[in-house]
Image (spheres, rainbow, N blue to C red):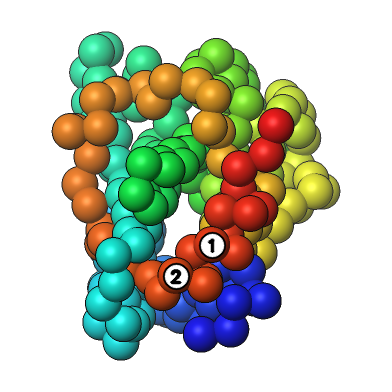
Amino acid sequence: MDANKRLGDFFADVFERIEKEVLNDIVRGSVSEENTITGRLLSAAQSHINNFASNQPKTESGLNIQANHFSSSGRGSQETLTGADGAIFLDISIGTTLVQKFYLFQAKRTLKSNRIDDHARKQRDKMLKRTSDSFFLFYSRNSFDFVSAFMVNVGDKPANLPSKTYTEFHQDFFNCFIGDQTSKFPFPISNIWMIHTLKLDKPWVNHFLKIEITD
């Protein structure tokens, strides 16, 4: 692997395949509700990342990609408490060095006429109380777009908000431009199911850590 490429660049094709597969499911009508969309995205991520990882060399350096699809029923549900549908958690472990970060997201189906309502505003406020790395994942039959929760206000049209595609967003997440390393994760790590532990070669991981660990 090319040590001069950032981690997210290696995963770009994986992110694109995940997005394309789930968008095809939406067009076919096999998934439509926000809750099922979230689960489908995470299962597609698990499948494609596992397939990618199976072709990588076995080394001592590890990168863990984990996810939590929050429970959504009842007043005490995880979604009610956090305002989020789920979270993605990333950690890299090399010897005594451990880098951990995560982001929260809330999935919302969008149409051209859609505007942000007060329910979404309340979800925004709950997420931002947990972490500044909170996002809305707006989806349609054509795309998935991540928008910072800071940018979302009542009356806004999602299509008019600054956004990143699914692939662009996760490239930035893996390249260290997105992700909370300072806040406590909303729930114990033991509650998170693992997508995959990916073993990386030393030059690749060392390059990533040069970007990741900053003052």
| Residue 117 falls left or right of residue 78 | right
The disc at residue 62 is none
Label 1 crowd bin: few (<14), some (14–19), many (20+), radius 10 Å: some
Q: Residue at x 39, y 26 (%)?
A: 185
- The picture places residue 23, in percent across and down from the top left corner, at 47, 72
Amino acid type assigned to the residue bearing label 1 in the image: Asn
Dividing the picture into quadrants, the one containing residue 122 is top right
Quadrant of res 206? bottom right
> What residue occupies the far front of the structure in this picture?
95
Q: Foreground: 129 or 214?
A: 214
33 left or right, relative to 136: left
Residue 43, horizontal then vertical, whole percent: 27, 63
Say which element carries label 2: helix
> Could you tell me if the residues under marks 2 and 1 are in contact, i.e. CB atoms within 8 Å?
yes
Residue 69 or 176: which is nearer the viewer? 176
Residue denoted by label 2: 202
The image quadrant of residue 3 is bottom right
Q: Which residue is mark 1?
A: 206
**Residue pictured at 58% horizontal, 83% vertical:** 2
Q: Nearer the viewer, residue 6 or 107?
A: 6
- Residue 122 drawn above or below residue 136: above
User: How many numbered marks are there?
Assistant: 2
The C terminus lies in which quarter of the figure? top right
Residue 35 x/y as whole percent: 32, 46
- Report the Cα–Cα distance between label 2 and label 1: 6 Å
- In the rendered structure, which amino acid carries the disc numbered 2? Lys
